Image: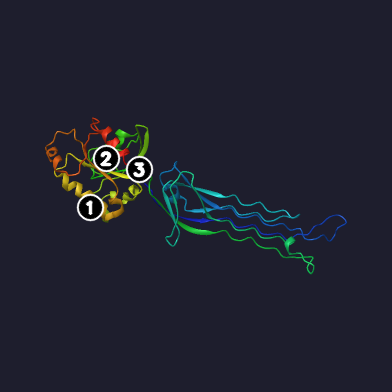
């Protein structure tokens, strides 16, 4: 998943004003009639739910809006340049070269005029005076605003699924939504965030599954650290600890510690702690009563307590 990009944008240049004089039959020395140049096109950012990656902006890194046309004779104003619209995924944070956040596009259809086109230059008709009836001066169009932008995508989801690799997050997401994450019995099956839309008892919400966390994830180990930012916007976390674990409490503490190290704010979010894969008949199930704070034992395979989990989730939304 491409969730970062650097682009250069340049709004359109204003068209030049024109030096022109009216020429008609029997009027050999008509006055000035040079028109103004058109304004340059603006650059507008628009958030859309139809995108979930910044891939396109890693391929195309430069964006140029249309320039304004020059003024014409007969006091005609040049055509303004067309605005350039750049579509970005909902959840994109936009920063300038000074790392200052200039926008957080969190709503579908949200717009931001990020670079204004240059103003068209005035034609010589504006420079006529009692002392200068034949002005041969016109203004050049102004340059449009140009800048480098840094784009950082944080997915928008209501619920974040967390846990060690192979803890059953992807199976749960596939069970409760129409999402189709890759599912296999080995670690790091999930290589990038997956969003699923869940409908339960009249409530619709988005659930994000990120790659499993391992010890040291917050400092760069494994895959999960790259995507922890994608659950920063969630309202609630669901922490899955597999019944296959030899030490449920130790595994739960690993994930909890990585959350705290990555972001104390993230670690303070409401969290539902559940034991997954409870359908498996294994000895470690005897450790379930040692996992303090566990609210449910679930199985996505046979739907055990899945409705209860969804009820619990929507109580936080």
- Image quadrant where residue 33 sits: bottom right
Q: Which residue is mark 1?
A: 257
Measure the alpha-carbon separation of dots 2 and 3: 15 Å
Q: Position of residue 8 (x, y in %)?
A: 48, 56
From the viewer's side, name the closer residue of 274 and 116. 274
Measure the alpha-carbon separation of dots 3 and 1: 22 Å
The type of colouring in the image is rainbow
Residue 158, which numbered label?
Answer: 3
> For the point 28% across and 51% down, which residue is it?
268
Q: Position of residue 163 (x, y in %)?
A: 24, 44
* Residue sitting farthest toward the bottom: 131
Residue 260 makes an appearance in the image: yes
Q: Is residue 67 left or right of residue 154?
A: right
Above/below status of 120 relative to 196: below
Q: Which residue is mark 2?
A: 169
- Image quadrant where residue 190 sits: top left
Q: Nearer the viewer, mark 3 or mark 1?
A: 3
What secondary structure is marked by label 1?
helix
> For the point 27% across and 36% down, which residue is it?
309
Q: Is residue 212 left or right of residue 39?
A: left
Q: Is residue 46 left or right of residue 242?
A: right
What secondary structure is marked by label 2?
helix
- Among numbered discs 3 and 1, the one appearing first in the sequence: 3
Q: Position of residue 215 (x, y in %)?
A: 21, 52
Q: Nearer the viewer, mark 2 or mark 3?
A: 3
- Among numbered discs 2 and 3, the one appearing first in the sequence: 3
Residue 220, which numbered label?
Answer: none
Measure the alpha-carbon separation of dots 1 and 2: 19 Å
Residue 263 makes an appearance in the image: no
Above/below status of 174 relative to 100: above
> For the point 31% across and 35% down, which residue is it?
174
- Among numbered discs 1 and 2, the one appearing first in the sequence: 2
């Amino acid at each position: 998943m491409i969730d970062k990009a650097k682009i250069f944008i340049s709004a359109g240049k204003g068209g030049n004003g024109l030096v022109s004089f009216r020429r008609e039959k029997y009027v050999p020395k008509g006055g000035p009639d040079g028109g103004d140049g058109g304004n340059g096109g603006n650059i507008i950012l628009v958030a859309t739910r139809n995108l979930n990656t910044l891939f396109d902006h890693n391929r195309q890194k430069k964006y140029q809006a249309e320039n304004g046309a020059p003024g014409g004779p007969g006091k005609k104003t040049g055509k303004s340049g067309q605005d350039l619209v750049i579509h970005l995924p909902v959840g994109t944070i936009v920063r300038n070269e000074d790392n200052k956040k200039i926008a957080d596009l969190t709503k579908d259809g949200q717009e931001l005029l990020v670079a204004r086109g240059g103003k068209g230059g005035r034609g010589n008709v504006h420079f006529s005076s009692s002392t200068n009836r034949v002005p041969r001066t016109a203004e050049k169009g102004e340059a449009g605003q140009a800048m480098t932008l840094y784009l950082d995508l944080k997915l928008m989801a209501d619920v974040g699924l967390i846990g060690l690799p192979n803890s059953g997050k992807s199976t749960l997401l596939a069970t409760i939504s129409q999402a189709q994450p890759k599912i296999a019995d080995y670690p790091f099956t999930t290589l990038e965030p997956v969003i699923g839309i869940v409908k339960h008892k009249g409530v619709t919400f988005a659930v994000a599954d990120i790659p499993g966390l391992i010890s040291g994830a917050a400092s760069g180990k494994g895959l999960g650290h790259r995507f922890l930012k994608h659950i920063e916007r969630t309202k609630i976390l669901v922490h899955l600890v597999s019944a296959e674990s030899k030490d449920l409490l130790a595994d739960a503490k690993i994930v909890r510690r990585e959350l705290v190290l990555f972001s104390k704010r993230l670690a303070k979010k409401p969290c539902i702690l559940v034991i997954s894969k409870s359908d498996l008949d294994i000895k470690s199930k005897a450790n379930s009563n040692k996992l303090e704070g566990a609210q449910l034992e679930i199985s996505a395979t046979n739907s055990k307590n899945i409705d209860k989990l969804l009820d619990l989730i929507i109580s936080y939304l």
